[in-house]
Image: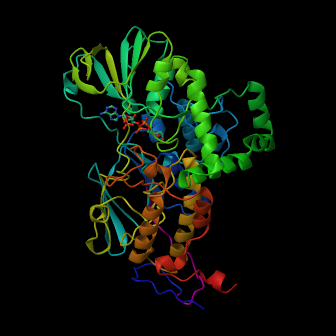
Amino acid sequence: MPVFWPRTLSAGHYYNVWGTNMSKRELRVIVIGAGMAGILAGIRLRDMGLTNFVIYEKSDRIGGTWRDNTYPGLTCDVPSHHYTYSFERNPDWTRHLPPGSEIQQYFERTCAKYSLYDAIRFGREVTRATYEDGRWQLELSDGATDVADVIIAATGVLHHPRLPDIEGMWDFHGRSFHSARWDHTVPLQDKRIAVIGNGSTGVQIISALAGEVAHISHFQRTPQWIMPVPNGYYSEAERERFRRDPAALEEAMDTATYEANVESYTEVITGQDTAGAMHWTKACEDNLERNVTDPALRELLRPDHKVLCKRLIFSPDYYEAIQRPGVALVREDITRIEADGIRTADGVLHRVDVIVYATGFHADQFMRPMQVTGRGGASLESLWLDRPKAYLAISMPEFPNFFMLNGPSGPVGNFSLIDIAEHQWHYISQLLDRLRNGDCLEISPLRESLERFETERVAAAKKTVWYTGGCRSWYLDSAGIPSSWPWNYSRFVREMSEPDWPAFGLEPPAHRSNA
Ligand code: NA7
């Protein structure tokens, strides 16, 4: 019979060191962030019977990225019914790909339905977390403090807007803003707009505003491959059927096909010579050939990197939009921004009234600028000196009982981050069970577990199309190594099914070894 001796004992808790539980330890849990993952954590904590928790949210509303982004055309590129919690289906999606505003409403509705608002503390940013005497001591932006046994960092990936560093950009006399800080006080209809940036965001804005404004110019430093994914409507009759009959909704979701697509996608990323690679490549090439009629424009729009090297853009109508009257593609490099517009390398001044910076995010920040200090003074900044890292994207040595959802090197391909977070929660809940059962007071991976994982992950990452495909993207860390999960989806699901306990210095739970 395995015996797990707690590393430290704290007053008020009773532990049965002989491997059978006399009582469950009450854990105080602090969740950071009330976006998609924080909401998931709150609901699941309650399901586990853990009621002593709060969710700190720095903003005044829930929703994370879906609260911050309100730009015209905002759409998630995951099929609507797969961008939903598995336990809270949404028969009311109106489109096959969910509009941003509906996603935000869905999260707000879910929060209300699960009475989660009571647990959320708005306008409170966690600035510091320090592990002392077996517990996490937290400091908040308003000077308050709190204490937790467990921290769940659900702080999101793409939430620190990245503005470019272009000479003269502060001299511009018109209005300008980042796409994630859309200024809805600026009327656009009779304006000349410049959109800088050609990721999913820039493409969606161009598609939405083409024909709706006086003129719009799309400044593309790097062309992108575009997958022509149609975005149809669910009729009211279909939605009513889904409301009445959850089985019909499940059938319409066709999860088997969705997961096969996800698997095929991840196979392509990790091995370019597969049949799947040819399928994705051909679909994007055909889209360009068939839907851009002017050969000169077509060549300007043709990427010189492999399909899927950058995060693939799903759009049913970008090529149509860029060919409309009043829409211009600008491929010349931007040299500076002046009072009246944008100057490009060919000397042309593109006169505009509004500049939208669709220039992406600092994807390597995660919970930072929060200062995190672990056991024995270990600092997060030191651990992440070369790149953000975590064992299986969830936990870090010397940071006991600190678990992340959508943390560094977790999967971020074109598939549902909700599904990813739910798998990660399944894993974290098993770690929480060990703490509650009194098997141990602290859980963190061994240093060698993280080192082994990172060595293997980086080696695999160098074989992915993100690394070999001839492009740069936000997937790459400061050393140019892809920061995402470099294996297929099945491996992720397998790894998340149950912790490899020895990697945490623990034996498997007693009930398993006794089985
Ligand atoms: P992305 O995908 O990071 O795209 C940012 C775009 O901004 C990309 O086209 C960049 O060009 C461009 N960029 C960045 N800096 C500059 C400067 N200085 N000059 C010109 N162009 C610049 O961000 P998104 O918001 O579109 O999407 C982020 C994710 O959100 C997306 O993948 C989905 O997961 C949802 P580059 O390619 O680097 O030449």
| 112 vs 273: above or below | above
Quadrant housing residue 127: bottom left
**Placement of 63 over or under 286, stated as above or below:** below
| Residue in the foreground of this view, choosing between 120 and 73 | 73
Left or right: 362 in relation to 341: right
Residue at figure coordinates x 69%, y 50% from the top left: 260
Image location of residue 355, percent across then percent down = 33, 22
In the picture, the quarter occupied by the C terminus is bottom right
* Residue 158, image quadrant: top left
Q: At 61% across and 59% down in the image, what residue appears?
A: 47
Q: Give above or below for 418 relative to 496.
A: above
Q: Is residue 363 found left or right of 116 in the rendered image? A: left
State the residue in front, 279 or 46: 279
Instruction: Give the image's coloring scheme.
Output: rainbow
- Magenta segment, which residues? 17-31
Residue 351 counted in the magenta span: no
Residue 163 position within the rendered picture, expressed as x and y whole percent measured from the top left: 30, 35
Q: Is residue 4 above or below residue 258?
A: below
Q: Position of residue 209 (x, y in %)?
A: 47, 18
| 24 falls in the magenta region | yes
Q: Is residue 84 visible?
A: no
- Quick one: quadrant of the N terminus? bottom right
